[in-house]
Amino acid sequence: MELRHLRYFVALAERLSFTRAAAQVHVTQSTLSHQIKKLEDELGRPLFERVGRRVIMTEAGELLLPSVTRALNEIDSGVRLFRGPGHQLEGHLRIGATHTFNINLVPICVAAFLSRNPSVKITVCEYPAAEIENGLRREELDVGIGYRPLEAEDLWFEPLYEEEMVLVVAHDHPMASRKRIRMFELHQQSLVLLTTDFATRTMLDDWFLSVGATPLIVAEMNAIAPMLGLVQRMEVGAVVSQQAVPEGAGLVSVAIESPTPIRIPGIVWRRENQERAIVKSFGAVVRGAVLKRHRTKPGKAARQKSADR
C-alpha cells in the first residue's frame, strides 16, 4: 500500500466521481480507477460501487475514510513544518523545571531552541516536581523537566539519564579530602537535607535505613541554594545532585557508594500534548543537549525508579 493510493481513495470519496477525482489528484481517469482497484485488492474489500453513472461508497469505504483522512492530515501537517523560510515554529511554550535543571540544562536548551525558532514565546517557571506535575494536569504548563512522577497515569515520563547524588562539603570539612565515601559512613555525621515532603528525602531516608546509618540532621530546607549556603558556613554536609553544585562556590563533591543514591531526570508531558509540534521540537532539543553533555543514549534504562517531590 502506498501513500498515493490513500490520497486517491480520499479524493474519490470526496468527489464520488472518477472524472473530478482524477483531475484533483492530477492523474488520468484510467490510472485512478486502476490504483483504486489495487487498493481494494490489497484490502480484500470493495470500497466503491458503480450504480449506473453514480459512484457510491461501500460500508468498508465509509469505515476506512475517517482513519485515512486523519492520517493524511497528520502527514501533511508534519510536512508543512519544513516548508517556508527557516522551518520556524510559532506559538507559546510554557516550561516547568526543578531548580537543578534550571541552573544549566534549561538555559542551554532554551537558547538552542530560540536560535532556531525566534518567533516562539517561551515562559520558564521553577517549581518542585510535584508542582510541575500539577501544572501539566491543569494545562498551565506544556512540558516539564524533572523526575519521574509518583502518579503518572495521565502523564508521560521520558527518562533521559541516571543522575548520581553526592555529598557536598566545604573545602575545610574533614571529608573534603575523600574521593568516595560509603553510605554507612554518614552515620552520626551532621547533614542538612531536604524537607520530608520531597520524595528525594524519602529515598535518602530509605537508603540510610538500609545500611543502618542515622545522620545528625542539623537543618531541613525546601531549596538547594540555602542548603549549600549553610554548607559553606558550617561543618555540615548536604546530599544533592552533582548538577546542583555551582562551580567556584568553594564546595567539594564526594561520591557516595554502597549504595550510590540515584535519581532519574526526564521530560514530563501530558499524554495528549506530546504530539504538538512545538513540544516535540523542544523535547528533541533537550535530548540533544543531554546526549552531548552525558555522552550516553537518551532514555537509558534506569537501574532503579526515582522521583522528586
Image (cartoon, rainbow, N blue to C red):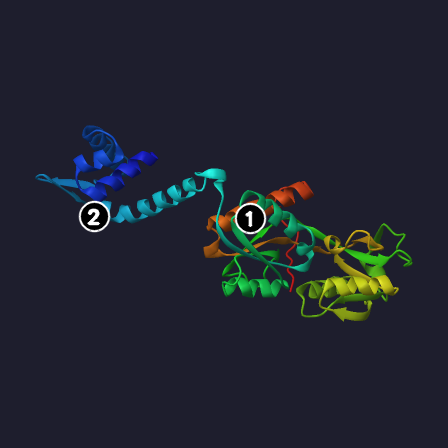
Residue named by callout 2: 59
- Please name the residue shown 69% across and 62% down the image: 200
For residue 263, above or below residue 34? below
Residue at 79%, 70% in the rendered image: 219
Q: Is residue 7 visible?
A: yes
Quadrant for the C terminus in the image:
bottom right
Check disc 2: other Cα within 10 Å, few if <14, some if 14-19, many if 20+: few
- Give the vertical position of 234 relative to 250 (above or below): below
Q: Secondary structure at mark 1?
A: helix
Camera-side mark, 2 or 1: 1
Question: Who's the residue at 65% across and 48% down the image?
Answer: 108
User: What kind of element bears circle 2?
Assistant: helix
Residue 11 relative to residue 272: left or right: left
Residue 246 lies in quadrant: bottom right
Which corner quadrant of the image does residue 201 belong to?
bottom right
* Viewer-nearest residue: 74 or 124: 124
Work out how far the residue at label 2 is from the one at label 1, CA to CA, in angstroms.
41 Å
Q: Closer to the camera, 64 or 226?
A: 226
Horizontal side of residue 100 vs 236, given as left or right: left
Percent position of residue 220, x then y? 76, 70
Against 106, residue 8 (above or below) is: above
Instruction: Give the mark nearer the N terminus: 2 vs 1.
Output: 2
Specify the amino acid type for callout 2. Answer: Glu
Give the amino acid at mark 1: Gly
Determine the residue located farthest toward the left in the rendered image.
52
Examine the rendering and report whether any part of residue 213 can be seen.
Answer: no
Tell me the tag on residue 150. Answer: none
Choose top left, top right, bottom left or bottom right for residue 19.
top left
Q: Which residue is mark 1?
A: 283
